[in-house]
Amino acid sequence: MGDNKIEILKGIIRDLHRGVDVETLQQRFARLAGQVSAGEIGEMEQQLIDEGLPAEEIHKLCDLHVKVFEQSLGPAPVPRQVPGHPLQTLAAENKAVAGIIGQTRETLDRLRGAKGPDRLAAVRAQLGELVEELGQIERHYLKKENQLFPRLEAKGISGPSKVMWAVHDDIRAHVKDLRRALDLGDVDLIVRAGRWVLQEIADMVAKEEKVLFPLALETLDESDWAAVKKGEEEIGYAWIAPPPAWPPAAEAAKAPTAANEAIGLDRGVLSREQIDLLLTRLPVDITFVDENDVVVYYSASPDRIFPRTPGIIGRKVQNCHPPKSLDVVERILRAFRSGEKDEASFWIDMHGRFVSIRYFAMRDAAGAYRGALEVTQDATAIRALRGERRLLDWDRPKADGEI
C-alpha cells in the first residue's frame, strides 16, 4: 500500500472537513493513478483517527467520503456464490433493504403529491408497515457491530468500525423520528424524516459494499470468518430467511468438556454445568470485563435485554460501545480503577419497559481492582409492586392488571 497515496487521500479528506467543494476534491482524486482499494481507504481513516482527528468528525461527513471516492471504487467481490458465508448474508440483506427503500420512497412521493386534509389516510397503513420493515436494520447493524467489527479490530483496523457505528446510531435515531412523525400524522415531517433516513441507509449500503466488504475480504482469513459466523443466529436476520450453515462441512469434533467437574468456591462446590445454569438463569443479564478492560464473559440468558454475541469475548470494552457513549464508559472505568467509586447506576424506559443498568467494581480480598461487572434487569414488574405478599399465592386467580 503506497504511503504517498495514503497521504494524498488524507489530504483530500482534511480539505473536505475544511469545507472544500466536493466536485473539486473529486477532480483532485481522479488525478491519482489507478483505482484506490478499500484497504487504502480503511487505512486512511485509521491513520486520521490515530493522528487525532476525532472519529465523530469523520462520521459527520461519512456520506461525502463515499461521494468523493465512489467513482474509483469497483464492485465489491462479495462471495455471493457461497451460501451461508457472513458477507453473502449481509449482502443479501442489503439487496432486500434496497427494495424496501424503493417502496418507501414511492409511498412518500404519493403522500407528498396528495391533496386534501385526509391525504395521509390512503397510505398510512402501508407506510407504517414499511417503517416497521426498516426497523429490522437493527439486526443487520448488530451483526456488523458484534461479529464483524471485533475481527477487524483484532487485525488492528478500528477506524471504519468507529465511523460506521456512529452512523448506525444516527440511523437508529432517525428511524425512531420517522415512526414518531407517522404517529403525529405530520405529513411534511413524515416526508422530510423519511427521505433523510432512506438516504442515510442507502449511503451506508454503498459504503459497506464498496469499502467494508472488500476491506474485510482483504483482511480476514477462514478462521476469522468462522468466528464472524458464530453468533449470527443469536442476533437474527433482517428481511431474509436464515441462511445455511457455513462452512458446510461438519465442524471437527470438539474435545469433551468436564461438565461435572467439581470446582471449589468460597462457599461451597459447584460443577461447571451448575455454574453455567446458575449464571444463565439469574433474573438479570451480566457481563464481566477484566482488569485490562477486556470482555471475558457474558451470560447467554434466553431473553437478554441488550444482545450479546460470542464476537465480543476478548474484545476491549471500549470497542463494544458506540462512540457517543465512550466518554461515560471511560469515566466509569477510571473511577473504578482508581478506587474513587465502586458503583454506577442508570435506568431507562425502553419500549415500555423500565430497565435498570448497574456497574460494579470487582476487587479481590486485598482490594486490588480485578474488573467490572455490568448487571442489567427488566425492573418493570418490580417497580409496579404495591403492598405486601407474605404467603405463597400460586393458586389464587389474579385480578385484572395484577402481576
Image (cartoon, grey):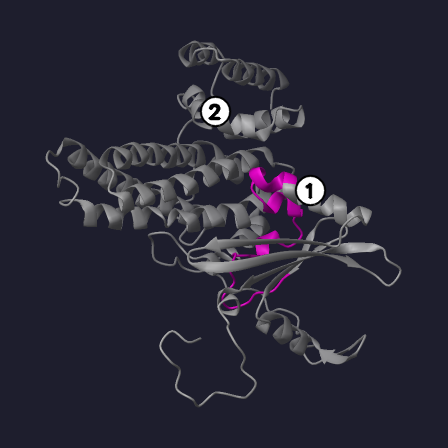
**Which corner quadrant holds the C terminus?**
bottom left
Number of callouts: 2
In the rendered image, residue 39, in percent from the top left (x then y), is placed at 55, 30
The residue to which callout 2 is attached is 61
Viewer-nearest of discs 1 and 2: 1
Q: Nearer the viewer, residue 296 or 109?
A: 109
Kind of residue at badge 1: Glu
Locate residue 237: give its quadrant: bottom left
Instruction: Count neighbours of disc 1 (C-alpha within 10 A) and say few if under 14, some if 14 to 19, many if 20 or more.
Output: some
Residue 330 is tagged as: 1
Badge 1 or badge 2: first in the primary sequence: 2
Q: Nearer the viewer, residue 18 or 389?
A: 389
Position of residue 309 in the picture relative to residue 274 (left or right): left
Q: Is residue 218 visible?
A: no
**SS assignment at label 1:** helix
- Outermost residue, front direction? 387
Q: Is residue 111 visible?
A: yes
- Outermost residue, right direction? 366
Say above or below: 51 vs 23: below
In the rendered image, residue 25, in percent from the top left (x then y), is placed at 46, 12
In the rendered image, residue 283, in percent from the top left (x then y), is placed at 57, 70
Instruction: Count neighbours of disc 2 (C-alpha within 10 A) and say few if under 14, some if 14 to 19, many if 20 or more.
Output: some
Kind of residue at badge 2: Leu
Locate residue 282: give its quadrant: bottom right
Say above or below: 325 vs 278: above
Residue 84, magenta (yes or no): no
Residue 305, magenta (yes or no): yes
Residue positioned 30% across, 36% down in the render: 194
Q: Magenta residues, as a range? A: 298-327
Say above or below: 77 vs 320: above
